[in-house]
Image (spheres, coloured by chain):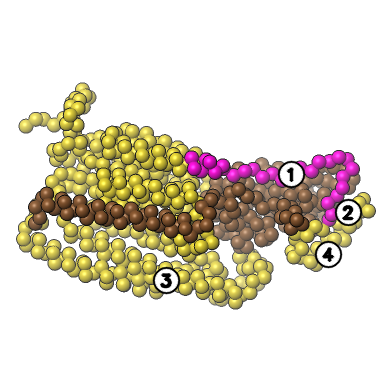
Chain colours: A brown, B yellow
Amino acid sequence: MEKKDKGYNRRDFINNGVRITLGLSVVGTGALALARSSTGKDYVWQIDPFKCQQCGRCATECVKSDSAVKCVHAYDLCGYCDLCGGYFKPGAKLKTGAENQLCPTAAIQRKFIEEPYFEYIIDEDLCIGCAKCVKGCSSFGNGSLQLQIRHDLCLNCNQCSIASNCPNDAISRVPANEPYKIKGDFLKEEDG
Amino acid sequence: MLKKIPTITIFLLLISFLAGNFIQAQQRFPKPEFDSGYVQPSPTTPEPRAMALEYFDVFVLLAVLSLASWLAIKKRSRRGLLWLSLFSLIYFGFYRDGCICSIGAIQNVALSIFQPTYAISLTALLFFILPLLFALFFGRTFCAAACPLGAIQDLLVINPISIPSWIRKTLGFIPVIYLGLAVLFAATGSDFIICRYDPFVGIFRMDGPFLMIFLGITFLLLGMFYARPYCRVFCPYGVILGWLSRFSKWHMTITPSECIKCKLCKDSCPFDAIEVPSDQAYRDPEVSRKNLRKFILYIALIPVLTLVGGWIGSKSHIFLSRVHPDVYLAELMITNPELKEDEENLDIQAFLESGETFEQLVEQASVIREKYKKGGLALGGFIGLVLGITLMNQVVFRRREDYEPHRGDCFSCGRCMDYCPVEKPIEEKVKLKDLWRKPKKV
């Protein structure tokens, strides 16, 4: 058995050594993590509209029961069609009742602009992010309707629940200063 | 020409049917030129939470940690810690919706170290590091007052029962495995299991999938009797905090001056984290020799356990690697080739449409599986090593004269300080309502 005071000194010494080692390893881990990351800036989740295949999981897989994914209309691309593939069910007769609407929650408002153009506005309170209109618009139209994660609704979970279930890997982290991927904007950049 | 759009629509509709999805981004219908002076609206793109606010969160964490450490060690105020934990519950829990949290940040750190394509945000990194550094100096004050998950459980401790040491020690090993798995899955980019199975985040958000809410309520109900069940049986961050806290420079003490061995603190602690004065029996040469023999045996066991663990870990890498979606998909398509025809299986259909070949997928999957082989070895070795050291610690006796908090297990919640009848030696303030708690002078 060690004498009490001598024992304390030895233990203090060991404790100090271990503490410094542990402290350095914590800081070291952090430094390593930071060194491996080029920027250290913040990220948010966003859907790449070109990868999205409109499977419909965005409506169901979000941790929020009212999904943070909504349809966003890139007006720049819109053809303002009368027969809108995103608004009407395929084979719908024009200018008939609401049963011709594709959207299950009637979240798309159709507004007459001038002959023969119509504007389509998404009511985001009603939109559930099911991508039915997006599918219609991409298949038959310009693809101006697209899904985006709305950052006023998104909780920015550490691991996006939709991203882990997306069959197309369309959801990824994007820098927080460029939080949206709107189709028209991409095309503008390509044009120069 | 412009007026003919509906006819063109039908014509193009047919073409687009044939062309399929490949010309998605193409402008099938030219953008109209309006005569009526219509102004085109812009897409709605609400901004995410400002960066400044993210840094404000770090500042709040730092302030809470500092205040908690001061309250636990200097001020010795259980009430202060309680109010502070309530604040953290409201701020980090209900206001910030439980994200970002230090527990989940383990995964971001692991991912950024092992996946060069992922860059960790500074806030996540600071949320990971700050509580650890505080633990190294002041003990687990993060658990006491800064962690919203701890706070919600702590508030619901109603009738805690004392659990035998061997059950606690055995259950206390689960977090080590959980930590290892979480790091492995995060490092291979498979999944963030800590976040996926976070039981309280659904309660903080008052919304969430059924499993999340169910787990949360189960943990809260269980926590009425088995105090802080998540912290003690699952929390992977608590493992690291516990290790660091064992070597902390300062730590909360039960009594402000001298322990009178009244045992009140032992009864007050809902977490069985108070160690009793050591039994004199270990001084007996017979017992001592026996313990020494055990000690040597356990030390010799450490490398054996590490190797065995590593072997088991690397053997189970095929099983573990199925957590990664690519490996899962590749295996599924190899074992059930008929699923390729299944229209309902979105994952396989999406893969077939993506244009990637099956060989590429298998190639990717085998790269990931190779990572898992190394990862499984490290995971198994790590678990074996911790098991060995835990066993060794069972026979290491430290002479203890007084009742002391177990530095690894103690959450610094301060209940014991509140119960300790010993007053501060200098400020001998006798409160009337405390008189009954004062021990009789002998």
Marks 3/4 same chain: yes
Residue with the mark numbered 1: B42
Per the image, label 3 sits on a secondary structure element best described as helix
Where is B426 relative to A169, above or below? Answer: above
Amino acid carrying mark 4 in the image? Ile
Query: Could you give the CA–CA distance between mark 3 and mark 1, rounded to whole angstroms?
Result: 50 Å
> In terms of sequence position, does the residue under pointer 3 or pointer 4 come before the other?
4
> In terms of sequence position, does the residue under pointer 1 or pointer 4 come before the other?
4
Q: Which segment is the magenta one?
A: B29-56
Residue with the mark numbered 2: B6
Chain letter for the residue marked with disc 3 in the picture:
B
| Crowd class of label 1 (few under 14; some 14 to 19; many from 20; radius 10 Å) | few
| Crowd class of label 2 (few under 14; some 14 to 19; many from 20; radius 10 Å) | some
Marks 2/4 same chain: yes
- Residues at discs 3 and 1 in contact (Cβ within 8 Å): no
Tell me: B123 left or right of B33: left
Marks 3/2 same chain: yes
Chain letter for the residue marked with disc 1 in the picture:
B
Amino acid carrying mark 1 in the image? Ser
Residue with the mark numbered 3: B374
Tell me: B419 left or right of A177: left
> In terms of sequence position, does the residue under pointer 2 or pointer 4 come before the other?
2
Chain letter for the residue marked with disc 2 in the picture:
B
| Secondary structure that dominates the magenta span | loop
Amino acid carrying mark 2 in the image? Pro
- Image location of residue B212, percent across then percent down: 48, 50
Residue with the mark numbered 4: B15
Where is B58 relative to B190, above or below? Answer: above
Marks 2/1 same chain: yes
